Image (cartoon, rainbow, N blue to C red):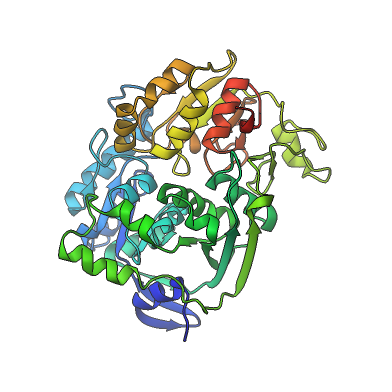
């Protein structure tokens, strides 16, 4: 029978069927971070268990660490304790650990693909909802809760109910100023934040094939904002070129054998999906959110809908029918597991060169990893940001989730390249508008929401 890519990966990892649609799956990789990783190892140890396969577990402190330039430790006492716990319990368990300043340190869903920890066809779990990001390389990657994380570490397996399969095909050519971030925001705006609930989503079509690997990671990153735990793009020559030679990628004959397996992963031509959508790229323009959910989104040339949620408008400080362009901006944040990779920084720097951030705007750029930071500095991208008036900061999650003592002030309006614009997400009372790196850079220059195509 013809099978989807998801079915092929799922079937290869079933340890046993549990009944009622549930299976016990083998996990090829487990990622852990500072908010839950140290605690999870401690709890299974206290329960008399050990980490089942420590060499398949990868730990990195990212959520609660400082992004302050020249940092030497975590930001505040809570973050310092979490970083210490993860470091010490990782050492005791013998898992891979990537500490502050080390090669490989960074946001967990940035460092995993760039080190080739995640590969096509693998199953990967992490105690973070944006684990779906890693599906951009053709993996089945999903976020799990705290109790599930303990089970995963102790057994290298996890019970999962098999989801239905959805495909979203983007056909056509991206227009000027349109990025992968705009593509996924447009889909969430069209289908809603519950559309993917109970599904694994495969992104396909000519516009997806034309994306770089880093752009595919961005596309998959917001799958969970559509309700789907899993987002995937079939691996191809773009994927293989990106992964070859990276730290944990197969080498020599093992690489050639892996390529043969990976080329068999894409969905069969006549595979049937439970739901199949098509988006014409001619209908996708640069996007920006106007409310307190990723589905509260519109083209930058648009207006707040007349029927917009009243509570969202009260919090965000906009009114129904108001034009989005021209709305004053106080902060700009370029970073997060959505948009902090080298290509993202290049996009933003291209807008900024030779220009200055508006005097009233506080602007931060937080590279996604030590490798991204070093590569950007070798290209001189940091100078473009610094000369424009941005702060060039250290790798970590930073203002995406404000779990590290850094936050946007109450009432301040921030254009952010992150993935969630919930109430209080970037700090108590902070007002968040999601956009691409280029759109965020343009907003920093203009001091207001603006169409990047003007630049």
Above or below, 146 against 78 in this view is below
Quadrant, the C terminus: top right
Task: Give coordinates of residue 454: x percent, y percent.
Answer: 64, 28
Q: Residue furthest top?
A: 359
Could you say which is closer to the camera, residue 455 or residue 274?
455
Horizontal side of residue 401 vs 287, given as left or right: left
Q: Residue furthest front?
A: 173
Q: How many marks?
A: 0
User: Which residue is pictured at 44% across the width and 51% down the height?
Assistant: 217
Q: In this orientation, does residue 158 appear?
A: yes
Task: Give coordinates of residue 166: x percent, y percent.
Answer: 57, 68
Q: Quadrant of residue 164?
A: bottom right
Q: Residue furthest bottom?
A: 1
User: Which residue is pictured at 54% across the width and 59% down the height?
Assistant: 206
Could you say which is closer to the camera, residue 250 or residue 194?
250
Q: In this orientation, does residue 155 appear?
A: no
Task: Give coordinates of residue 436: x percent, y percent.
Answer: 55, 38
Horizontal side of residue 308 vs 131, given as left or right: right
User: Which residue is pictured at 63% across the width and 53% down the height?
Assistant: 281
Task: Give coordinates of residue 278: x percent, y percent.
Answer: 64, 63
Q: Quadrant of residue 449?
A: top right
């Amino acid at each position: 029978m013809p099978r989807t890519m998801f079915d092929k990966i799922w079937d290869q990892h079933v340890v046993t069927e549990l009944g009622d649609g549930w299976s016990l799956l083998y996990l090829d990789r487990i990622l852990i971070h500072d908010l839950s990783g140290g605690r999870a190892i401690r709890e299974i140890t206290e329960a008399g268990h050990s980490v089942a396969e420590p060499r398949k577990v990868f730990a990195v402190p990212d959520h609660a660490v400082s992004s302050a330039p020249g940092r030497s430790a975590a930001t505040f006492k809570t973050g310092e304790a979490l970083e210490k716990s993860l470091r010490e319990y990782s050492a005791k368990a013998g898992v891979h650990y990537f500490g502050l300043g080390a090669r490989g340190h960074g946001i967990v869903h940035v460092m995993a693909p760039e080190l080739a920890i995640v590969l096509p066809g693998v199953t990967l779990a992490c105690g973070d909802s944006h684990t779906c990001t890693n599906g951009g390389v053709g993996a089945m990657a999903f976020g799990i809760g705290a109790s599930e994380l303990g089970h995963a570490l102790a057994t290298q397996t996890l019970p999962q109910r098999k989801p239905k399969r959805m495909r979203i095909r983007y056909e056509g050519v991206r227009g000027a100023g349109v990025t992968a971030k705009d593509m996924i925001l447009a889909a969430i705006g069209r289908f809603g934040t519950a559309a993917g609930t109970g599904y694994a989503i495969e992104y396909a079509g000519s516009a997806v094939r034309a994306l770089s690997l880093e752009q595919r990671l961005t596309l998959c990153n917001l799958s969970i904002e559509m309700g789907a735990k899993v987002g995937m793009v079939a691996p191809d020559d773009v994927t293989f070129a990106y992964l070859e030679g990276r730290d944990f990628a197969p080498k020599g004959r093992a690489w050639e054998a892996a390529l043969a397996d990976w080329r068999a992963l894409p969905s069969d031509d006549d595979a049937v999906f439970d739901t199949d959508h098509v988006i014409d790229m001619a209908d996708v323009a640069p996007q920006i959110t106007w409310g307190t959910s990723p589905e509260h989104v519109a083209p930058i040339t648009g207006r707040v809908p007349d029927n917009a949620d009243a509570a969202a408008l009260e919090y965000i400080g906009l009114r129904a029918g108001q034009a989005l362009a021209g709305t004053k901006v106080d902060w700009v944040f370029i970073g997060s597991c959505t948009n902090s990779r080298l290509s993202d920084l290049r996009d933003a720097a291209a807008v900024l060169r030779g220009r200055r951030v508006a005097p009233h705007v506080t602007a931060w750029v937080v590279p996604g990893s030590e490798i991204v930071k070093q590569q950007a500095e070798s290209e001189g991208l940091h100078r473009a940001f610094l000369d424009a008036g941005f702060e060039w900061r250290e790798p970590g999650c930073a203002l995406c989730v404000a779990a590290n003592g850094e936050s946007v002030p109450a009432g301040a309006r921030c254009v952010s390249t992150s993935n969630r614009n919930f109430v209080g997400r970037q700090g108590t009372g902070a007002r968040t508008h999601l956009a691409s790196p280029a759109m965020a850079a343009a907003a920093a220059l203009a001091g207001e929401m603006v169409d990047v195509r003007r630049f």
